[in-house]
Image (cartoon, rainbow, N blue to C red):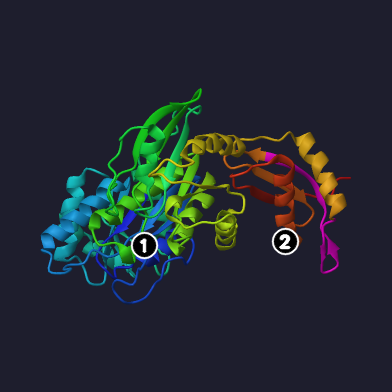
């Protein structure tokens, strides 16, 4: 089931990043008392009362930018936020009170038809706020919810309100026999060209102008005996490179595509290698637990000798070490060079991400691994691993029962992962390992 998306919008410096950090339980957004300090649009999963959703920290909606009319600029950004997210939090500054810009944003959010929560931040005295709440009723978004993001006041009530306002969760995964393949990457790396080549038809617009694809476009097709859905996504670019408001929110659709796919084809430009933004995008796929294939495009434009492919792949492994398990494939979407093998590799990775290992077989291998390389000790206490079991698939998830999880060093955990891959494969699939304490069997 795809996680719903919640976007925080509002004027600059109303506390969006602070609220984002508070609701997601971490300090991942830059917080500074200066308008516009959010450099990257941030995305992070939140979990409240057993339900997960993706929270988005957005840049402030500026009253004026480059001479653009206030009404036009506000309308475009507010409508895009409302259109892309399942729920929008309109955040206001309780110290300065409602402004004309706030009212304009609220007006367009109201027209969008999507759920909106009116949240008033920087409220320190909730008793006094009860006397001021009527000022916000003219926004037409229902009673305002006061919070203090900096101190965490009322954050639990806000999370409860978010769950109530979100649409009821439905099964968005559809037919489990259909493999969903998302083609992701920075703008202008050839995603739409690859879709067209794989489908053998001009199903999506191809242009050499970055950012042509705005939506995540689903196209069902059959390869061999299996049904697939190709998801072509808008290019994900850094916020500092975004000039049009439409691109600000197209990234939401790309992240949705990653969230609901089974396998992601991570497209890279052969001439540019792995950029920082490539690593961010690949990180989204990895954290979402999806199968992934590194597809190096525009290979026809690279001057090569007999060692070029190996050298490029080695450099990719060094720069994207967290994807050591991902297969790499070199193509030219323009000419069709080596494209025909992609679906074969995709089917293989999809199967690897769904692979199950019997508990008896797993523990038979585990005994061998422990014999070959006994667990190290820590402060005079030796780690004991009693047994393991596979908890789930997509991604393959294993639970190891030990005497003390705190003394399991990350290097030994990496050893266990390498042994899992060596024994059972899981190529292209991220492995999740859960370490649980269990008393020593009598």
Where is residue 44? Give x, y as percent: 45, 56
Viewer-nearest of labels 2 and 1? 1
Give the mark, 2 or 1, whose residue is nearer the N terminus: 1
In front: 331, or 175? Answer: 331
Q: Residue at x 59, y 57 (%)?
A: 307
Percent coordinates x, y for residue 155 in the rendering: 41, 59
Please rate how many residues cluster around mark 2, counting C-alpha atoms within 10 Å: few if below 14, some from 14 to 19, many from 20: few
Magenta-drawn stretch contains 377: yes
Residue at 45 percent of width and 38 percent of height: 181
Separation (CA) of disc 2 from disc 1: 33 Å
Tell me where residue 109 appears, x and y as whole percent.
21, 51
Q: Which residue is found at the position 72% from the left and 56% from the top?
A: 413
Q: Is residue 333 magenta?
A: no
Front in this rendered view, residue 154 or 16? 16
Label 2, secondary structure: give it. helix
Residue position marked by numbered label 2 in the rendering = 411
Q: Is residue 245 above or below residue 175?
A: below
Image position of 394 (left or right of 242): right
- Callout 2–callout 1 Cβ contact below 8 Å: no
Vertically, is 114 above or below 413?
A: above
The stretch in magenta equals 374-390
- Residue 290 visible in the current orientation: no
Q: Which residue is mark 1?
A: 238
Q: Residues within 10 Å of mark 1 (few under 14, many from 20)?
A: some
Q: Viewer-proximal residue, 406 or 264? A: 264
Q: Could you say where residue 407 lies in the image, as x and y percent from the top left?
A: 76, 62
């Amino acid at each position: 089931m795809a996680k719903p998306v919640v976007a925080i919008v509002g004027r600059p410096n109303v506390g969006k990043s602070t609220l984002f950090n508070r609701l997601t339980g971490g300090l991942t957004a830059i917080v500074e008392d200066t308008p516009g300090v959010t450099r990257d649009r941030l995305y992070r999963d939140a979990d409240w009362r057993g339900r997960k959703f993706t929270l988005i920290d957005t840049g402030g909606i500026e009253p004026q930018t480059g001479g653009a009319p206030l009404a036009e600029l506000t309308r475009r950004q507010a409508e895009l936020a409302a259109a892309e997210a399942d729920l929008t939090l309109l955040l206001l500054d309780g110290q300065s009170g409602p402004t004309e810009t706030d009212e304009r944003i609220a007006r367009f959010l109201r027209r969008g038809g999507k759920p909106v929560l009116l949240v008033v931040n920087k409220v320190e005295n909730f008793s006094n706020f009860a006397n001021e709440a009527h000022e916000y009723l003219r926004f037409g978004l229902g009673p305002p919810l006061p919070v203090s993001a900096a101190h965490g006041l009322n954050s639990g009530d806000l999370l409860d309100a978010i769950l109530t306002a979100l649409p009821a969760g439905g099964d968005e995964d559809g037919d489990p026999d259909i493999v969903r393949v998302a083609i992701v990457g920075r703008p202008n790396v050839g995603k739409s060209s690859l879709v067209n080549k794989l489908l053998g038809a001009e199903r999506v617009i191809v242009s050499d102008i970055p950012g042509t694809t705005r939506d995540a476009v689903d196209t069902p097709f059959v390869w061999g005996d299996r049904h697939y859905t190709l998801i072509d996504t808008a290019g994900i670019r850094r916020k500092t490179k975004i000039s049009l408001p439409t691109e600000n929110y197209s990234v939401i659709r790309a992240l949705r595509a990653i969230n609901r796919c089974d396998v992601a084809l991570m497209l890279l430009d052969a001439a540019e290698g792995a950029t920082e933004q490539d690593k961010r995008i690949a990180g989204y796929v990895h954290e979402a637990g999806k199968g992934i294939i590194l597809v190096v495009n525009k290979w026809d434009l690279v001057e090569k000798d007999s060692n070029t492919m190996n050298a490029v792949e080695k450099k990719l492994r060094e720069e994207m070490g967290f994807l050591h398990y991902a297969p790499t494939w070199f193509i030219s979407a323009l000419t069709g060079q080596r494209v025909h093998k992609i679906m074969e590799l995709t089917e293989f990775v999809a199967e690897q991400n769904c692979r199950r290992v019997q508990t008896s077989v797993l523990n038979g291998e585990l005994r061998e691994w422990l014999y070959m390389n006994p667990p190290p000790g820590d402060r005079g206490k030796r780690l004991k691993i009693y047994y393991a079991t596979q908890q789930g698939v997509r991604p393959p998830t294993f639970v190891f029962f030990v005497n003390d999880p705190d003394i399991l060093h990350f290097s030994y955990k990496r050893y266990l992962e390498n042994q899992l891959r060596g024994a059972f494969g899981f190529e292209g699939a991220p492995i999740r390992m859960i370490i649980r304490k269990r008393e020593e069997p009598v």
